[in-house]
Amino acid sequence: MMNAKRTAIALAAPLALAALTAAPASAAPAIPDGVTVEVATVNGSGCPKGTSAVVISEDRTAFTVSYSDYHAYAGGDATPVDSRKNCQLSVNVHVPDGYTYAISGAEHRGFTGLEAGATGLLRTNYYFQGLPRDTTADHQVRGPEVKNWEFNDRIPAPQLDYKPCGVSRNLNLNTELVVDQKGSDGKKTSFMSMDSTHSSARYYFEWKRCP
């Protein structure tokens, strides 16, 4: 499922943010009009039909993916299948002629309830269809923990992967939730969820004019 070559990403931190904001504002291209995002295909146990939606922001700087039934849990009456849930989204970002884009960062949000000794994992992966590079990140939560969580990733400017100009390529977005209850009381349920009354995931555009 994942490509052989990967782009390392930087977690949101002062140095990473400094790298993203170092360029002068005048260097940024204008954000084009007429940008749309449509879901081409959706598959996975974490996003059954009708439980996910994609919406672009009004300023066209980002788009959000919301999930309404994305939960992984282990322990108690859970089965091995329940402990791992995933979602594979392929989206078509319509970009006007003369522009292209990269994904410069992502935010993922959810809720977790982990017993002592249990762990929850969020794994993210996104890439352009047919291209060799992808961007991946793992985030782990350790129990005991009952709280909302949010993970922010930023890609340094030199590592941005732009869609080739003049070529039609869908953007593939893969996420995975895994709960491991080894080391915890197996009679008690631990879970990790990625659904929200707001956005569950938000992906940021970096725009560039084509030559």
Image (tube, grey):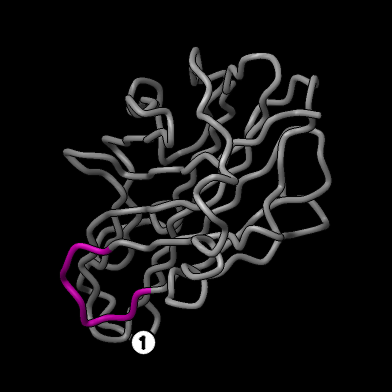
Between residue 80 and residue 106, name the one nearer to us: 106
Q: Which residue is mark 1?
A: 183
Q: Is residue 117 above or below residue 124?
A: below
In which quadrant is the C terminus drawn?
top right
Q: Position of residue 26 (x, y in %)?
A: 54, 45
Q: Is residue 98 above or below residue 43?
A: above
Please indicate, yes or no, whether residue 172 appears anywhere in the rendered image: yes
Q: Residue at x 64, y 58 (%)?
A: 157
Please check the rendered image and state whether residue 157 is part of the magenta-colored stretch, yes or no. no
> Which secondary structure class fits the magenta region best?
strand
Magenta stretch in the rendered image: 141-149
Q: Position of residue 25 (x, y in %)?
A: 50, 49
Residue 134 located left or right of residue 18: right
Please indicate, yes or no, whether residue 38 appears anywhere in the rendered image: no
Dot 1 amino acid type = Gly
Q: Residue at x 34, y 20 (%)?
A: 50
Q: Position of residue 174 (x, y in %)?
A: 56, 44
Q: Position of residue 97 (x, y in %)?
A: 69, 14
Q: Is residue 186 above or below residue 39?
A: below
The crowding category of the residue bearing disc 1, from other C-alpha atoms within 10 Å (few below 14, some 14 to 19, many at least 20), is few
